Each structure stands twice: as structure tokens, then as C-alpha cells.
Image (tube, rainbow, N blue to C red):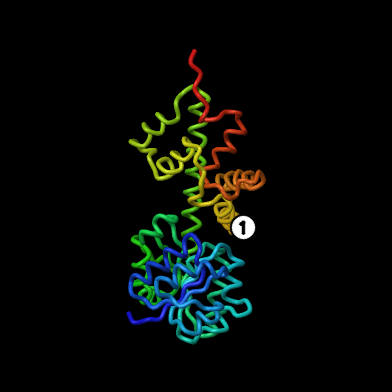
């Protein structure tokens, strides 16, 4: 596919994704709010641009990977935004995790200018972004998905077309419901074990081999036991995702009691200044509520 590609948003996830597109042989123009964020890309052969509009003026496909709904709206609709530079017939691929309703609105505004849009949020974190092994859930027109799929294959291994605009974001919301409830479950299970005088590490080892075994128990569970909360996926990003979920549920009159509970626990971490920790720090809330700390030595008596 002979196509000029732009990439906007060069943070923890965006940088390795953009590098994988360069390695795939795609000419790349990039924009990051911080000039230094573009340096690893220009060193790899990308061309730095001064604004999202400049990226769009020279690209057939424009990828976006930023933090929140307002960031995507600013990149697309703001002064010197994508919409002011994009040519009719090009495609915007938003890989951020944002509001499904906002996604549909952005798609409609771009369509009015003759520009296609896919929402393609990802799951897998920084490691899978580096390895080109992300899960990608895509919303938009099926024929546009087919055209972009070869580029998705440079970024991920599990690429699934969900439906129309906004459905990729809804699938990502489902992902975050499952992930956050799973982390909450691990934190509660370990605290329950410790309160009952049982080694949570041995409990984890036993559970990994059974029906309860899952990625959260494997990865976040180990982080909890080691009290290692260096960020893989930050609390503040999970809090943002849960806010989107709860806002969407509120609009629909939908009860999600488990998600509401975890959202409050994430709020508690933000309020205690722990927003930049890994989301496995959710165990801190459960420990403090119960005055039981899973890393404390077991009483021998």
C-alpha cells in the first residue's frame, strides 16, 4: 500500500507504534506537543511537523494517539487542527481511548469535509505496543477498515472490526470494565488471604493454575506482592476510562455497580496523590480500608 502516513501523539504508546510503522516502510510525518518527543522518530527517518494541520496536509492516513477526549477534539478541531489541513479522501484513525459519543460527533464533522474516520482504541500496554502485538478494536466503515488493515497489522496481532463509528470505543470500554474489575478482585483476594493468615504469594501461585488464572492475577498480582507500582498503565488513565464508562452508562440509564465501585477506588487513589502509579496500586485502597497489608510479614505464633 503506497500511502503517506501521519502520526500525532508520541507518548508511551504513540512512540513505539509510530516506530513500528516506520519499520514497516511507511513514510511518516509526526507531531508531538513536546519537540523532544519527536526526536526518536526523526532519528528513525520521520519528518517532524509544526502542527496537526501540517501533518494532515501531507498525509493520506493520519493516526492519533493522545490521552483523553478533549485532547482528540483539540488535535482534530482546534486551531491548526487536522480538520483544517486534511484533504478530501484521506482518513483519520484515532487510536486513543475516548468517549463513544464524542467519536461519533467527530466522525460526522470529518465526513462533512469528505474525510473518513476510524476509531481504533488498543489494549495491551507499552510492552505490546513495542512488540507490535496490540489488540485493536475498530469502528467505522468496513471498506475503510479494509484499506487501513495492513497498517494495523504493523501495530497489533488481534485486530477486530466491531461496527460503525464509536463501536471501537464501546468495545474498549468493555475491555476496561473487565480489566479494572479483575484488578479489584485480585486486590480483594490478596487482602482476604493476608487477613486470614495465608501467604498471598502462595495463593496467587495456586490460582494461576486454575479457573481464576488471568492476566491481572499474573501481572498486577505480582506487582501488588512486590509493592512495585512503577507505571505500566497509570491510575489516572484508568480513572479517565472509568469516567467515560460511567458517563456513557448514565446517558443510557444503565446500572454498572461493579464499575462504579472501582471508579470510586480510583478516585481515592487520585485524591491521595497516587495518580501516576500503576493501576495495581488499587490494592492500596483495599489495604487501607481494612488496615491489612499484604506485604507485611505473617505472624508466626
Residue 264 at x, y = what percent? 62, 45
User: In this orientation, which residue lies closer to the viewer: 165 or 274?
Assistant: 274
> At 42% from the left edge and 77% from the top edge, which residue is drawn?
5
Residue 150 at x, y = what percent? 33, 72
- Disc count in the image? 1
User: In this orientation, which residue lies closer to the viewer: 139 or 199?
Assistant: 199
Residue 207 at x, y = what percent? 38, 34
Q: Is residue 165 visible?
A: no
Residue 157, by quadrant, is: bottom left
Circle 1 — which element? helix
Q: Give the residue at the far right of this rendering.
A: 271
Residue 279 at x, y = what percent? 53, 47
> At 48% from the left edge and 59% from the top edge, which residue is drawn?
172
> At 47% from the left edge and 79% from the top edge, which residue is drawn?
116
- Looking at the image, is 78 positioned above or below residue 187? below
> At 42% from the left edge and 43% from the top edge, which residue is drawn?
219
Q: Give the residue at the far top of this rendering.
A: 301
Q: Can residue 106 be seen in this view?
A: yes
Location of mark 1 (residue): 247
Quadrant (top left/top right/bottom left/bottom right) for the N terminus: bottom left
How crowded pointer 1 is (Cα within 10 Å; few <14, some 14-19, many 20+) is rated as some
Amino acid at each position: 500500500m503506497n500511502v503517506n502516513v501521519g502520526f500525532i501523539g508520541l507518548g508511551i504508546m504513540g512512540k513505539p507504534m509510530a516506530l513500528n510503522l516506520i519499520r514497516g516502510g511507511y513514510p511518516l510525518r509526526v507531531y508531538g506537543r513536546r519537540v523532544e518527543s519527536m526526536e526518536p522518530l526523526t532519528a528513525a527517518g520521520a519528518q517532524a511537523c509544526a502542527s496537526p494541520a501540517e501533518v494532515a496536509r501531507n498525509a493520506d492516513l493520519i493516526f492519533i494517539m493522545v490521552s483523553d477526549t478533549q485532547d482528540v477534539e483539540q488535535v482534530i478541531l482546534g486551531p491548526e487542527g487536522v480538520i483544517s489541513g486534511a484533504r478530501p479522501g484521506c482518513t483519520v484513525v484515532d487510536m486513543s481511548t475516548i468517549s463513544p459519543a464524542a467519536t461519533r460527533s467527530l466522525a460526522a464533522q470529518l465526513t462533512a469535509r469528505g474525510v473518513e474516520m476510524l476509531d481504533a482504541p488498543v489494549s495491551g500496554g507499552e510492552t505490546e505496543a513495542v512488540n507490535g502485538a496490540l489488540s485493536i478494536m475498530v469502528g467505522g466503515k468496513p471498506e475503510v477498515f479494509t484499506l487501513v488493515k495492513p497498517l494495523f497489522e504493523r501495530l497489533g496481532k488481534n485486530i477486530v472490526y466491531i461496527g460503525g463509528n464509536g463501536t471501537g470505543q464501546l468495545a474498549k470500554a468493555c475491555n476496561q470494565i473487565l480489566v479494572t474489575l479483575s484488578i479489584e478482585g485480585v486486590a480483594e483476594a490478596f487482602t482476604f488471604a493476608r487477613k486470614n493468615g495465608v501467604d498471598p504469594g502462595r495463593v496467587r501461585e495456586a490460582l494461576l493454575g486454575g479457573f481464576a488464572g488471568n492476566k491481572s492475577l499474573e501481572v498486577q498480582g505480582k506487582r501488588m506482592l512486590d509493592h512495585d507500582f512503577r507505571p505500566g498503565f497509570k491510575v489516572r488513565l484508568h480513572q479517565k476510562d472509568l469516567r467515560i464508562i460511567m458517563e456513557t452508562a448514565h446517558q443510557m440509564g444503565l446500572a454498572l455497580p461493579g464499575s462504579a465501585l472501582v471508579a470510586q477506588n480510583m478516585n481515592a487513589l487520585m485524591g491521595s496523590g497516587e495518580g501516576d502509579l500503576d493501576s495495581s496500586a488499587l490494592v492500596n485502597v483495599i489495604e487501607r480500608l481494612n488496615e491489612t497489608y499484604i506485604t507485611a510479614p505473617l505472624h508466626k505464633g
